[in-house]
Amino acid sequence: MSKRITWHANALICAIIVLGFALTSYISYHSNREAFEEDAERVSMLTSDSIARDIDARFTQPIDVSLTMANDSLLKERLASELDHFDEGAYEESLRSYLDAYREKYGYDSVFLASAATNRYYHFNGIDRMLEADNPENDWFYAFLESSEEYSINIDNDEATDNEITVFINGRILDDEGETLGIVGVGFRIDDLREMFAEYEEQTGTSAYLVDGEGMIEVSADSAQDGRADLFDAGALDGLESQALRDRDDPSSLWYSSSGGSGYLVTQFIPHLDWFLVVDHDTSELDAQIAFQFALAVVVIAIVIVLVLLATTSIFRRYNRLIAMQATAAEQERKSMFQEAAEQVYDNIYEIDVTHNRAASEETEQYFRSLGAPPGTPFVKALSIIAEKQIKDEFRQRYLEMFTPASVLEAYARGEDELTYDFMSTVDGKTYTWMRINAHLFTWSQDGSVRMLVYRQNIDEEKRREHALIEQMQRDSLTGLYNKAATQEHIRAKLASAPEASFAFLILDIDNFKAVNDCFGHSAGDTVLARFAQTVEGHFRREDVVGRIGGDEFVVFLPMDDAASAEKKAADLVEALRMDVETDAGTCSLSASVGVAFAPESGRDFETLYRRADRALYHAKACGKNRYAVDGA
């Protein structure tokens, strides 16, 4: 009887243990799997976004450099005179040196110039070939000439560098009448993208590909696949082409599972290349690990059932400790993987519980405390502290408006799950650097709250490089003054910002400058122009607009309280510009004529002021030059 009771008791205990262990293992399995899937999705999305930004950044500078060369007035002058000098070795050498200078400065694999007048293809190594219309290799040249695009991107073999596969950025060179003089551009090898993909694969455990609209692999870390393999033709991704490549407007993602493997796939369209970026996070090994852990749990159950007959209490305690250790280890592993992958790209990562207006991680709490916020400070209060201590004044209001809990929840309700803001930040209160916040919004499955992952990225070098390029594009290469387009833009901006203010508009012209070129040569003429520009610029403030608008014609635009002050300034200029300039060819005696117009008396727009000042300049020339004249006088 006692044995029967013991047997029933043991059977009941074993049944309870089996049921309890089965339920616990089931819950643990699904909890771990959900955490693992969230981690895989986040890492894959972050990797896809980072690669897309890197690709965009790699194309920004080449585009800017190509457009800078295309708008270089010196290059335009040289190309416009090609028909007069194309058979001269010095002319060819000047173009080769120009192209080679850009190649050495920026490190591009190819820098070229194609003439619309002669169909010559100039390379940094010299004239490479003639672009014959019946050669398919030259279709890009004639197609671009027929288009109206300012620039274009094409990927082709570079015949000038052993037919290496190269990305070319082509910029259109226009003359003053808007006619195409030629095409100038730079090229870099596709191997650069392969190296970038390999680095991301090593850092994040994902695989990245660039594929065309049919799924053919164009670029990957493995060059053996490029142009030879269809990503969706075999293996785990077989048959997923229509789902993965259907959206060209927004990134798309999907989970897949087949006999070939399982994983998470993220795709987004790259307009620069007309290709799709595909990031594949293969989770087959992780799936196997989870299955192994589940099988291991079953074995543990069997062992525990045997041992519980001897020491039920001891086994229960040991089992509880094992479960706690497994859960903690799995959670820690998930956090570590995500942290390591994300920190490769971003300086700081914080997590906010937007719904409950609080920090959602210990790291975020520590960050708030480092700024002087007491423990438990609401997020909206901590946000104000951050703005006051770290954000530059002109960016502070927009920062607060974008990231307050109410604004974030409204954005998420509209379907926005990504927020981005560029601003200037400081640590010491004196030195400011450009930073970018990328905030990812999502719903936390455990309590339904809206969470926000905040990534802070230092973009100071990128911003400063961008501003430097803009400034370079606005300057005349010979004199360092504003070029014609920049001069017009700045004058129009000043007129628009102060419609009631008084301004003086001066046009300066070097008297008999053609004789300088004829007698002393163009090199001496360049020296005269540079000295003339330096003298003019020295008579004005930094905030005044001083520009060269063509040849030996210069424009100055500045605020002026009365006409007498403007006339005195013009007289001083005429006096200062009456000088001798030493050149390699000899001494040149200079003088200048100045035409003056006033806003608003002479007009309120650039064209009218230019026309009236030019009329005054003509009058000064007609009266003997070396003097100034005022519009309407």
Image (cartoon, grey):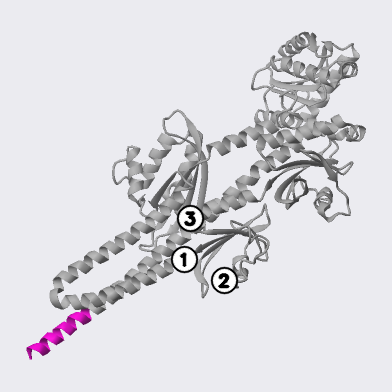
Residue at the image position 20 percent from the left and 67 percent from the top = 318
Residue type of the residue flagged with mark 2? Gly
Would you name the residue on which mark 1 appears?
A: 283
Using the image, tell me which numbered label, if any, was put on residue 204.
3
Q: Secondary structure at mark 1?
A: loop
Task: Depth check: give the residue in front, 96 or 615.
Answer: 96
Residue 136 visible somewhere in the drawing: yes
**Could you tell which of marks 3 and 1 lies nearer the N-terminus?**
3
Decide whether the magenta segment is chiefly helix, strand or loop: helix
Q: At label 3, which amino acid type do we have? A: Thr
Q: Nearer the viewer, residue 535 or 230?
A: 230
**Residue 631 visible in the snapshot:** no
- Residue assigned mark 2: 235
**Residues marked 1 and 2 touching at CB (< 8 Å):** no
In contact (CB < 8 Å): disc 3 and disc 1: no
Task: Using a 10 Å C-alpha cutoff, classify the residue at mark 2 as few (fewer than 14 neighbours), some (14 to 19) or many (20 or more).
Answer: few
Magenta stretch encompasses residue 14: yes
Asked whether residue 464 is drawn in magenta, I would say: no
Asked if residue 468 lies left or right of residue 414, the reply is right
Residue that sits furthest to the left in the current view: 2
